[in-house]
Amino acid sequence: MIRPKSTNQAVWADVYTYAKLPAELSKLDELAHNLWWVWTPKAQNLFKRISPELWDSTEGNPVKLTRLLTGEEIRKITADQDLLKEIDSVYTDFRAYMDEPADEERPSVAYMSMEYGLTNVLKIYSGGLGVLAGDYLKEASDSNVRLTAVGFLYRYGYFTQALSPAGEQIAQYEAQDFTQLPLEQLMNEDGSPVVLEVPYSSHIVYSYVWRVRVGRISLYLLDTDNGLNSEWDRSITHQLYGGDWENRMKQEYLLGIGGVLLLNKLGIKKEVYHMNEGHAAFMSVQRLLDYVEKEKHPFDLALELVRASSLYTVHTPVPAGHDYFDEGLMGKYLGHVPQRLGISWQEFMDMGRENPGTDEKFSMSTFALNTCQEANGVSKLHGKVSQQMFAPVWKGFFAEELHVGYVTNGVHMPTWAAPQWQEFYAKHFGKDFVKNQTKEEVWGKIQQIPSEEIWEIHHNQKLQLIDYIRKHYAERWIKNSSTPEVTKAILDGINPNALLIGFGRRFATYKRAHLLFTDLERLSRIVNNEKYPVQFLFTGKAHPADGGGQGLIKHILEISRRPEFLGKIIFLENYDMRLASKLIAGVDIWMNTPTRPLEASGTSGEKAEMNGVLNLSVLDGWWYEGYRPGAGWALTEKRTFQDQSLQDKLDATTIYDMLEREILPLHFDGRQEKPFSEAWMQFVKNSLNFIAPHYTMRRMMDDYFERFYCKLAKRSAHLHADDHAVARSLVAWKQEVAAHWEDIQILEISDAGTLGFNAGQRDIDTSGVLSLKLDKGRLQAKLDVELVFAKPDENGQLHFVETEALDLSATEGTMEVYSIELMNKRPGHYKVALRILPRHEGLPHRMDFAYVRWVNIL
């Protein structure tokens, strides 16, 4: 019998073919490969005109669009003189933008972040942190500052979200085809890829390097998914925030240490080094190594120089949200570092511990604080929360005294203001509006513009949102539905005349997406009131490991399918930047309901502001500063109940009351002959006038330079001058203080009794002299001796009030006497203590050298 011949398996090779653009269309390729088009409506319209179908099917990816053009389509383009003129016009604008000389007055900056949200087609972001970083690069370009950024090119990026018929989140990881993205791989002169070698403790990890052109800014992305690495290391840049703690260690090692090595390889030196979150804190490790090994500086000097030029921005309001590595994992990956730095393993580990000398895990945030001169939160309230959170790092100081500052986040207005709004702003606020976007008086012109014109723009955005939902969700919803006719009715039932309320963010439990559904009976009455039609649009992803967040999504979906909520509560899956841009411009109200005070900043509401959309939010994050009466709605920042379930019920009731008694009547009543209420439009005008100008990325960028970058660059240059003379002197002073700090002996405290310290009480308007006599021993440093006044709150926790300095009144050899004449002028209960600190005019702040000695005055 003749048997069929066996056949081996086919081996398939990837082949990419596309028609090469002719020379006369080379401008298109240059435009497609620079993300300037992301925030330039004129450029987007050009690509849409070339092929509306491809623009839509590629989700707005001009690189992929141009590579999918057929030879015939390219010939048609080259024969279309009007289209060629439009290409020339856009390119002329682009070159005028690109060729403007950079701002040499401001310091140069290196910026490192784990994610960047620049466009939906480049999936290297997951949420707010990444979108903020992406907006930051765009504004750096618009402000024309000298900034270079480093991050990762993820093969699978963050997941695409799908929902099962049962409402369960399905995370789908789709490989990115780098050849179809707006980026370019760095190549050597011989045509081979540039390879960055990053030495881990036991082997080398090899990374390809890609560049994303963000207007005038370069973002360099590391990529380990190449054949030079083992499978173990290829996966380092596979997923954003994926894998276990060891994978996180490998990623943060690559970002911080590899990021600095990359800048070195490219010959890029900056005046300021900015780590966006603790993920990038290991950048200080490599910078220390460079000073110690290349420039032969001792460790203490290297640390002074690194600190003086470093800034750490924290985005997380709770300690649990920070990264901690156990000592075994630290040893496995950074065990080689201390010897190279000339310090012990214990000393290195203690740089990442709140309590040195213990066996605490290594905190990336604590390490960042110990290697950065400056640190900041991302809103005014978050700055205070961060001070409380980081207070244990600097023993002897109250949270309120700390140098930890803040810069409230903003958003890149040209990215998030819809094109129609941008045209409106240019028409009424002037052609230079983008340069004047932070001026309230410029936005104030909105008050004189007829409400009809503003309403028409907003209504158009609303129609575009509804059209987008119907177009992009109909097929998948019908496919997942057992009743297609019901799904179609929901889509058709999205009402442009209803009040649309949007809620879109990461589905972490503290964001309280469930809050609206606390009282379903009352909610049903609200959404089924024919006089005041209202619909809610929810969207957001939960982390694949966050069961609680995924449960919230399922819970909302289940409620949305109940008869009384069908078509009134709608969940839109796969929240990304494209959906966000439609949603924040098309709803009437943007709602945010975080558990106070856990919203570090939150920027989605700021994006809504740029489109005349009103905010309804808890006074937390940016809204704590941004809220203005008559321009939105706010739930108080104060907690009434410590029991969170009771607080949730109260907040839910407050929202229901606001909707029924204020918001819905304001929106619908008083319309008369118009399709809108003048009272509502006044809220919109007030919001644009008094809130929007203060929450742009331009303002945020200016704040970073004013509060941190310029200060850091100036001091860093001072420490580097004259062969680091000032830095060397400061190091010597610190070493002397550290060696002899314990020499201080308290000899006498006198006259304290007349002030009532012993009795624990004293009369108002009495006075007395407090005197402290001490022996400094071998300590040469000058001292600050001060009384510290603190006040306990209702929970007994002490809060800083003020200090009063004692004067140096007498010296005799190593003995010194400090005294102060005090007048009792504070009624009420407060605490008083005496402390001693070393003084040096060269310190940027007291926490830079946090030596404190408390003295018993009782």
Image (cartoon, helix red, strand yellow):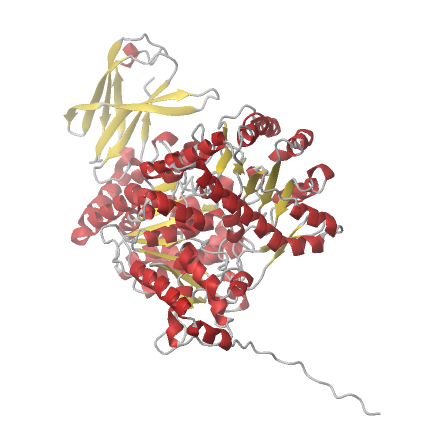
Task: Please give the name of the residue rendered at 58% of the width and 51% of the height, measured from the top-left corner.
Answer: 467
Depth order, front residue of 538/703: 538
Q: Quick check: can you spot residue 623? A: yes
- Among the 4 quarters of the image, the one containing residue 493: top right
Residue 569 at x, y percent in the picture = 64, 40
Location of the N terminus (image quadrant): bottom right
In this picture, is 4 found above or below 847? below
Count the labels in the image.
0
Hey, which residue is sitting farthest right in the picture? 1
Is 87 above or below relative to 482? below
Q: Check the picture and name the quadrant holding the C terminus.
A: top left
Q: Is residue 834 above or below residue 10?
A: above
Residue lying at 31% horizontally and 30% vertically, measured from the top left: 853
* Image coords of residue 107 (percent x, y): 26, 51
Residue at the bottom extreme of this rendering: 1
The image quarter containing residue 655 is top right
Q: Residue 622: in sight, yes or no?
A: no
Q: Position of residue 606 (x, y in %)?
A: 44, 41
Q: Is residue 50 above or below residue 448?
A: below
- Residue 233 at x, y percent in the picture: 51, 65
Q: Residue at x 20, y 23 (%)?
A: 807
* In the foreground, 330 or 520: 520
Tell me which corner region of the image, top left, top right, bottom left or bottom right, holds residue 702. top left
Residue at figure coordinates x 31%, y 24% from the top left? 802
